Image (tube, grey):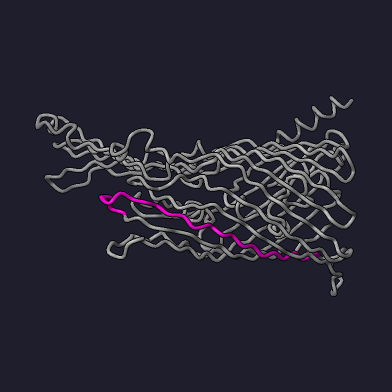
Amino acid sequence: MIIRRLASLLALAACIPTTASAGFFDDWGYSPRAVAQGGALTANATDFSAVFYNPAMLVLRKDVNFGFGIDYARTDMTVQPKTLDRELDCAYCDPNDWVGEDIGLLFPLGGKVQNHLALGVGLHLPSARLLSVRAPDPDRPFWYGWNNEPDRIVVLLGAGIRILDQLSIGIGTQALADLTGDGAKVTVDLFSKEVKFREINSHLATTFGPVASVYVTPLPNLRFGASWRSEMRVRYSIPADITMEGVGQLKMTIEGYNHYTPHTFTLGTSWDVTPQVTLSMDAAYQRWSAAPSPYVHVAVDMGGATLEALGLGEALDLDSSDRCADEACSPGFKDTVVPRFGVEYRLTERFTARAGAWFRPTFVPDQNQFHTNILDSDTLGVSGGIGWSFDDPLEVFQAPILIDLAVHGLWLLPREAEKDPTDYVPSYSFSGRVVGVSAMVRYNF
């Protein structure tokens, strides 16, 4: 009977187009309740935020849960040359502040799958840019995690499936859009200065990556969770094919990757020390060593009978990766383990206090080489917040309205890049901090 029910639930859940795209939620957090507890919610996501932290926990709720919130972050980054006699190109040294809106919805299904299947939906909308793809020149320092990571839509969908009273699983996919296609094709007559043919064919192609999670409660006051999110990246490819009649053909390709998030494996536990106090702990392994280069790759290929006759068939070709060895073209990122801690204290039935902390070791190696200036540091995060509920004074809603507030501080610890004296970029030091607030209104139908 259990096997038959499990097969039915898996078949139904497989038909659900579950998608996600997380990115900066790893550093920032999804929902003020999560932000306030340092993101340690793999075994303690009791609302719609489970769609990101552990979809298996969506099935725990019996009622529909809705939330709408606003996030604000102020960045204060410092990048300074170590000598005053040389200038540093700092066009991307200080990322922009950002504001975004969050929407979340959790709804358990009824019928024959009641208490066995629930769905979750999450949406983050940046206020300034719906999607930003920015890849600075290798000789310009830029903050890897804050350059344009918050500037994209985040869509989250997940499904939680109850297998046993003490066991549930979550499944889903991640989705991003690649900018690909045939690019631009142009035919020109240079002698008559006439454009004879011109067209462009590019599109946003959706890419997917799987998500899986599990939730176990061996004891009523002790819970464990585990999740895996596949790596995701935005690939952009902008080819151009220009035919110059009587001269030759120019083929140019501009391509690269942006908004990369690594394979992430997370283990978490949540323990009710008392009926009022819950402690949460997470440890996330992130496989940054598989990350592609964040820099633009440019390739130019010149050909044609006339150029070949002049001996210029390959003389005018170029490839931006030629100036580095294969291993140097990789950013050389290191895998990391990120610990997170959170506490929630339910002072009364209507008021809750929360606090959290986490530490992320940097995945970026020393930037002492030529043509690489990726900024990132060991990062310490501290957070706190409150939640309270009250009856609707207008009596529009029957159940209490819930308000969550959180403050969050990130300190990117000081670091240095020691450049060769012949490098175009001088040696420099860098550090930073990010301070933010999150607010949300939640309601349980």
The residue positioned farthest toward the left in the image shown: 310
In the figure, is residue 264 to the left or right of 226? left
Whether residue 173 is visible here, answered yes or no, is no
62 is higher (above) or lower (below) than 432:
above
Relative to residue 270, is residue 34 drawn left or right? left
* Image spot of residue 204 (x, y percent): 48, 44
Q: Is residue 48 above or below residue 408?
A: above
Residue 274 lies, in percent from the top left, at: 89, 54
Residue 407 sits in which quadrant?
bottom right
Q: Position of residue 47 (x, y in %)?
A: 77, 52
* Nearest the eye: 380 or 57: 380
Please say whether residue 44 is one of the residues in the magenta stretch: no
| Residue 198 horizontal side relative to residue 347, left or right | left
Q: Residue at x 37, y 51 (%)?
A: 418
**Furthest-bottom residue in view?**
393
* Residue stretch in magenta: 402-425
